[in-house]
Image (cartoon, grey):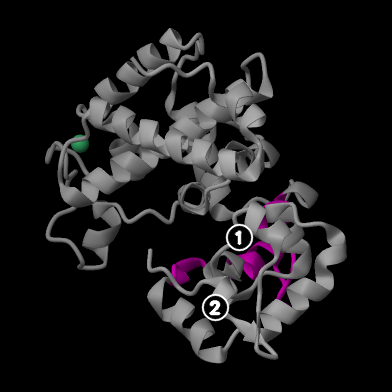
Amino acid sequence: MVLVCNIFNITSNNKTFFYKDWFERSIKYVDQLYDYRIKDFYSFNDICYIYGIPSNNFLKYYTLIKSIPIHIKSEINTNNAPCTQTTFVENILGRKNKTNKIFYTLQIKNPTENSKTQNKWQVLFGVHELNWKHIFTMPYKATIESTLRNFQYKYIHRIIATNKYLFKCKLSNSNLCDFCSENIETIEHLFWECKHIQPIWNHLTSFLEQQQLNVKLSFLNVSFGIYSLKSKDCNNIVNFILIMMKLFIFNMKFKKQVPIFNCFIHSLKLKVQIEKEIALSNDTLQNFEQKWNRIKFS
Ligand SMILES: [Zn+2]
């Protein structure tokens, strides 16, 4: 992801923006405010919902959005544009006008109007109706990191560049899996079925067991999360790890290297360390420890 522009470099009447509340909620870059699907900035309601910004911050939001120079907006567009699903919100609602509610809020309010992608998942899992409210809100509960949230969002919408897809677009020489070179690289194969990926999930199950987090992993919960553990913190930790693992697999695919479990644990350790630093500077160390203390890296 290309770093777009630091919010604190934008000025209005020669004054630099620094919103303490926003900074503490990790809003630092302009692209975090941008909705790539509609190629426009999130509405104020969306920002409140996604980042937990207080609802009396409208003037702050408005001043900031109005002060973002037009060239930065076009830079965001050209640097990082998952355009394929640009109009899907309209498609789902079956109406043309742009809506200012983001996708998962729509899903919560219109649970009966499933998209083609949602139906595809349901057929795949042989489930009549998946709990889309849980599925869409899970990444926002599990992590504050936009990279992980974005990845899970794309995963849910199957906007994942597998070789099956790339080959169809003539962007890859083969549709076979980069790890085993034996099967067609679909989402199902890449993240679950591949003979090089199954051991990784088995390792993860044992690792979680060591932390007293007993879960039976399946392609369904690996894809969409765990909701059955005794506390919300436990569910959130496991879901954080599940998103991170999928992103790890995906990154290794592009390196064409078979994922190694210990490398994953190493990057998880770093991530937790970063969360700790953020918690320290935000004075929320107690929350951090309550959440992460159960994870012991040996
Ligand atoms: Zn494979």
- Camera-near label (2 vs 1) is 2
**Residue lying at 59% horizontally and 68% vertically, measured from the top left:** 35
Q: Which residues are magenta?
A: 81-107
Q: Quadrant of the C terminus?
A: top left
Which one is nearer the viewer's eye here, 153 or 180?
A: 153
Q: State the image quarter where residue 166 is shown.
A: bottom left
- 188 with respect to 31 (left or right): left
Q: Is residue 225 visible?
A: yes
Q: Residue furthest right?
A: 56
Q: Which residue is mark 1?
A: 27
Residue 84 position within the rendered picture, expressed as x and y whole percent measured from the top left: 45, 68
Residue 217 position within the rendered picture, expressed as x and y whole percent measured from the top left: 44, 20
Q: Which residue is mark 2?
A: 9
Three-letter amino acid code of the residue under disc 1: Ile
Q: Secondary structure at mark 2?
A: helix
Q: State the image quarter where residue 27 is shown.
A: bottom right
Q: Residues within 10 Å of mark 2 (few under 14, many from 20)?
A: few
Three-letter amino acid code of the residue under disc 2: Asn
Instruction: Indicate whether 15 appears above or below 51.
Output: below
Q: Residues within 10 Å of mark 1 (few under 14, many from 20)?
A: many
